Structure formats: C-alpha cells, structure tokens
Image: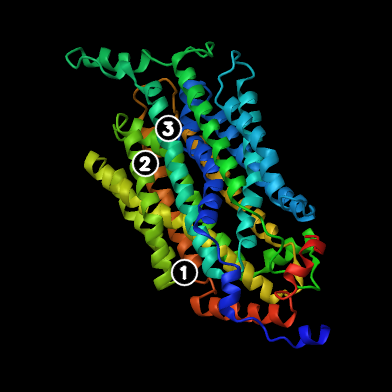
C-alpha cells in the first residue's frame, strides 16, 4: 500500500483547482464579514472630525490629538495582533475565527460610546480619546485575522482574486451604507439656521450675525438634539455590525493551513518581521499604497468640512458623499475586469484619475462639477481599495517561493501592512486637524476665515494629488508582473507536489498545529 501510494501519479491540475474552488455563497459571506468594519469606519472617517469640532466643542488641536493617537493605537495593535495570532492554535472553529468573534461585542460597545456626548466638559477629550483608541485597537483585532483569512480560503490565485473582488465590492458597499446612514441621520445636526439671514440687513450686522449666533448644542447638554441624532446613528450602525458578523460566521469555514508542507515549522515572529521588511516586492507595494491611502483618508476626513465651509455646498454634502461611494461600489467589478485583462500593476495607475478632478473642484466649486468630480473620485477610490488587497497575496506567494519551509508568516504580512496604513493615516489626520488649528478654525461658526478655507482647499486638492503621484511613481518599480505571477503559481504547485503536501493534506489535517 505504501509503495502504491508512493508511486501514485500526482493529481491533475484541474482536479486540484476543483478542490480549492470557492462557492459563490462562500465568497459572499466572506465579503459580508468585511462590511461591518467599513460601515463603522466610513462613518468615523467622514463625520468624526466635524462631530468633535462642532458638536463636542473640542478644539482642533485636541481633535488632532484624538485622531492621531487613536490611529497610532490601532497601528501599534497590528503587530501585536499578528504576533499573538501567529502563536494561537487551531480550534474547532479555526485559528483566526475565534479572534474575530471575541472582539466583536466590545467593538460595538466602544463604537457607541465614541459617539456619546458626556455631560462633563473637563474630561471630554480623555473620554473621546479612550473610546476612539479602544475602537481602533478592537477593529485591528478583527481586521488582521480577517485579511489574512484570504490566504486560507484557497491556494488558487484566481479564486483568491475573485474572493478579494467580492470582499472589496461589499466593503465599498459597507462604506456607502455607513456614510449614507450617518449622513442622512445627522445631516440635520449641521443645518446652520443662522446662515440663512435676510440679505437686506446691513452688511456689518449680517457678518456679526453669521459669526455670533450659533445654532449648535449646549456643550453641557448630552441630550441635545444634535447629540441624540449621533447616538441614534451609532446604535443603528452597531446593529448592522452585529448582523454582518453573524452572517460571516455562519457562511465561512476556515480551512487548516492549505499550503503547509509536511516539513514546515512556524517562523518566529521577529524573524518573520525582519524577513518581511527585507522582501523587496512587499516594501515597494506597501510604500506606494501607504501614500495613496493617506491621500484617500485626507479626502474623506476633510470632504464634509470642505463642502460646508469652503465650497458653499453644505446642503449637498451628504448626497456628494453618497455619489462618491456609489461610484466606488459599482466600479469595483470594472477594475476587476481591467486587472484581469491588463494586469494589476497597469490597473493601479487608474487611481491617478482623481488628481485633475480634485484640483478642478478646489478651483471651480460648482455644484454640477462637484457631482462629476464625486463620480470620478469614486472610480479612483474603487481602484485604491481593490488593488493593494489583490496584490498582497501575490507578494505572499512570492515570499513562500523564496522561503518554502516557512509558515505562520501570513498574519505578519497583513498586520504589518495594516500597521503602516494606519500610521500614515494617523499622521495625515493629525496634520489635517493641526492645520485647521493653526489657521484659526472656529467651531460653531457659520463662515470661517480665508486662511481656513485655503487650508481646506490644500488638504482636498494639492496634498492628495502629490501623495498619489509619488505613490504611483514608487509603484513603477514593483517587480511582480502577470508573467512572474504565473511562474510563481506553477513553481508552488510543483513544490507542493514534490513535498506531497497536497496528497497528505486530508491525512494530516487533524494532526497539524498551525
């Protein structure tokens, strides 16, 4: 028997592909799992800064501290999460799934209290800082294993790319749901009644009225109308969060490491981190998309402020946000087709479409142009969301080929990537809020100074354009092409057959400790 098994020919490639093919239902449930974080993250990205400034009455400097330290906390949690997850053992529901389930109720609670306006003023900054840091850390504990789960769904590159496209589509829809829900519910909290004044009055008194008669909540009243609508929005989004995780858990079954060779040993975390940081394709990919994601984050966090104070589009900002996100959602399949036909590296340069239109919006704040810019921005955002997560598995496969006997490194790649993304976003948000503080942003004011308006235009137009241009320049040197991807795939299949990992996978599944 042993000799017969030893001499058995390797299974055909088509049979292997069938074994690791994912059903549409599995892909949809996996994609739904990523939506809750995007729903909550989108609401925070678009509205937390204006909430802190105009509802909670926190100074721009303190708001910048909350945003930066919160993002930094999430970033620091990434490598820690990667370390502990890489050390965890297989359970009845998997190795990654327990982490995602355990952190979910605490994530929902921290998200709700992040939008609760406490009845005290002296410790209000500490309140928001605490719960925003908790929210960022807990979402990291979910995002790291969820992202790494892509590598444990299938060994087939096309199946992973397809699952990633489903995931990105659903995450963009989650972003849309979060922004739309939050925008529609809280829009009335930002209706400036004192901005609608009789034009026939004296100009001097008109300006005084615009500056001195705010219609914002009493900072001592946590039950003011404006505070209540934010709490209602937080409660609804918390419910959506729980529903998405339940569907994800019921519809996705984590597989024990489907690539592990029989001689594999877990790679020590510190050694794996050093190898990751020395892996050329990963360094170039991460550096490029860190700059691009920072540009997108700046657009998100300042867009509402720009529409409100710099473009006189305050009555349209929620519809413009929805336009951006609808465009992003419907164009993810478009980019999936583009990357399949022309390659991932070529498709990434479609992100540059955002640059000229963002500059046009800043220089010509016209309503019709604003909606057109919103649509094109959504097109570019779809590419910026899909491509890094589609390209990262290729980098991991490339690393596997160069280090064939290492395992447990998947979470290191994903946690370090999320770490750098959050650090860059935190720096961008901190600079953004600090710039508003420096230029004299005043909460509860209908008309801001010319310096504030100029700062918002720079944060929406010039800075993202420069970051995207530099990021795409770095991506030119990214070495993994479509030809090298195919070569890597064939080499890994040969490697697995030679080590009989495919033939022995089912036999050793129960005995393998990942």
Is 170 in front, or is 354?
170
Does 290 sit above or below residue 305?
below
Is 23 in front, or is 389?
23
Q: Which corner quadrant holds the N terminus?
A: bottom right
Q: Which of marks 3 and 2 is in front?
A: 3
In the rendered structure, which disc, 3 or 2, sits on the residue that comes first in sequence? 3
Q: Mark 3 points at which residue?
A: 181
Q: Residue at the left extreme?
A: 200
Q: Which of marks 3 and 1 is in front?
A: 3
Q: Which corner quadrant holds the C terminus?
A: bottom right
Cα distance in 3D space between marks 3 and 2: 26 Å
Please tell me whether mark 2 sits on a helix, a strand or a loop.
Answer: helix
Q: Residue 50's spot in the image, x, y percent?
A: 46, 29
Q: Is 5 situated left or right of 299 in this image?
A: right
In the rendered structure, which disc, 1 or 2, sits on the residue that comes first in sequence? 1
Q: Is 90 situated left or right of 222 in this image?
A: right
Local crowd size for mark 1, using a 10 Å CA cut-off: few (<14), some (14–19), many (≥20): many
In the rendered structure, which disc, 3 or 1, sits on the residue that comes first in sequence? 3
Q: Is 146 situated left or right of 504 in this image?
A: left
Q: Residue 18's spot in the image, x, y percent?
A: 57, 71
Q: Residue 208's spot in the image, x, y percent?
A: 32, 14
Does 213 sit above or below residue 141?
above
Labelled disc at residue 345:
1
Q: Residue 467's spot in the image, x, y percent?
A: 46, 55
Q: Name the residue under label 2.
A: 457
Residue 365 seen anywhere in this rendered image of the structure: yes
Residue 417 seen anywhere in this rendered image of the structure: no
Labelled disc at residue 312:
none
Cα distance in 3D space between marks 1 and 2: 30 Å
Marks 3/1 in contact by CB < 8 Å: the verdict is: no
Local crowd size for mark 3, using a 10 Å CA cut-off: few (<14), some (14–19), many (≥20): many
Please tell me whether mark 1 sits on a helix, a strand or a loop.
Answer: helix
């Amino acid at each position: 028997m042993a000799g017969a098994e030893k001499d058995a020919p390797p299974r055909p490639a088509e049979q292997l592909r069938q074994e690791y093919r994912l059903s549409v239902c599995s892909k949809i449930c996996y994609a739904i799992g990523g939506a809750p974080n995007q729903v909550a993250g989108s609401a925070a990205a678009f509205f937390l800064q204006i909430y802190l400034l105009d509802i909670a009455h926190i100074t721009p400097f303190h708001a910048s501290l909350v945003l930066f330290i919160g993002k930094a906390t999430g970033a620091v949690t990434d490598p820690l999460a990667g370390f502990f997850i890489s050390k965890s053992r297989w359970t009845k529901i998997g190795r990654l799934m327990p982490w995602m389930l355990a952190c979910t109720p605490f994530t929902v609670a921290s998200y709700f209290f992040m939008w609760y306006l406490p009845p005290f003023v002296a410790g209000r900054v500490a309140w928001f800082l605490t719960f925003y840091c908790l929210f960022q850390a807990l979402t990291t504990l979910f995002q790291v294993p969820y992202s790494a789960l892509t590598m444990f769904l299938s060994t087939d590159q096309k199946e992973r790319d397809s699952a990633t496209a489903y995931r990105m589509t659903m995450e963009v829809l989650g972003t849309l749901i979060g922004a739309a829900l939050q925008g529609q519910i809280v829009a009335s909290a930002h209706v400036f009644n004192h901005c609608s004044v009789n034009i026939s009055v004296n100009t001097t008194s008109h300006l005084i009225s615009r500056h001195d008669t705010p219609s914002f909540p009493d900072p001592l009243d946590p039950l003011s109308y404006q505070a209540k609508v934010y709490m209602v929005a937080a409660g609804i989004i918390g419910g959506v969060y729980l529903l998405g995780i339940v569907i994800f858990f019921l519809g996705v079954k984590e597989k024990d490491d489907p690539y592990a060779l029989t001689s594999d040993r877990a790679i020590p975390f510190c050694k794996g981190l050093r190898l990751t940081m020395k892996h050329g394709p990963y360094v170039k990919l991460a550096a490029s998309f860190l700059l691009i994601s920072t540009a997108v984050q700046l657009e998100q966090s300042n867009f509402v402020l720009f529409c409100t104070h710099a473009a006189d589009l305050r009555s349209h900002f929620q519809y413009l946000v929805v336009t951006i996100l609808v465009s992003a959602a419907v164009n993810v399949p478009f980019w999936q087709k583009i990357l399949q036909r022309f390659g991932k590296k070529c498709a990434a340069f479609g992100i540059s479409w955002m640059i000229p239109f963002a500059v046009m919006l800043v220089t010509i704040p016209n309503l019709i142009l604003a909606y057109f810019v919103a649509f094109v921005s959504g097109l570019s955002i779809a590419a910026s969301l899909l491509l890094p997560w589609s390209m990262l598995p290729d980098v991991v496969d490339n690393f596997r080929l160069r280090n064939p006997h290492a395992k447990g490194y998947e979470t290191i790649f994903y946690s370090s990537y999320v770490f750098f993304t959050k650090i860059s976003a935190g720096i961008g948000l901190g600079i953004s809020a600090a710039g508003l503080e420096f230029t004299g942003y005043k909460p509860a004011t209908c008309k801001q100074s010319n310096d504030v308006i100029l700062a918002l235009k720079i944060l929406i137009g010039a800075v993202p354009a420069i970051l995207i241009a530099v990021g795409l320049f770095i991506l030119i040197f990214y070495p993994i092409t479509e030809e090298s991807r195919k070569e890597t795939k064939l080499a890994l299949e040969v490697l697995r057959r030679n080590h009989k990992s495919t033939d022995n996978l089912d036999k050793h599944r129960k005995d393998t400790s990942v």
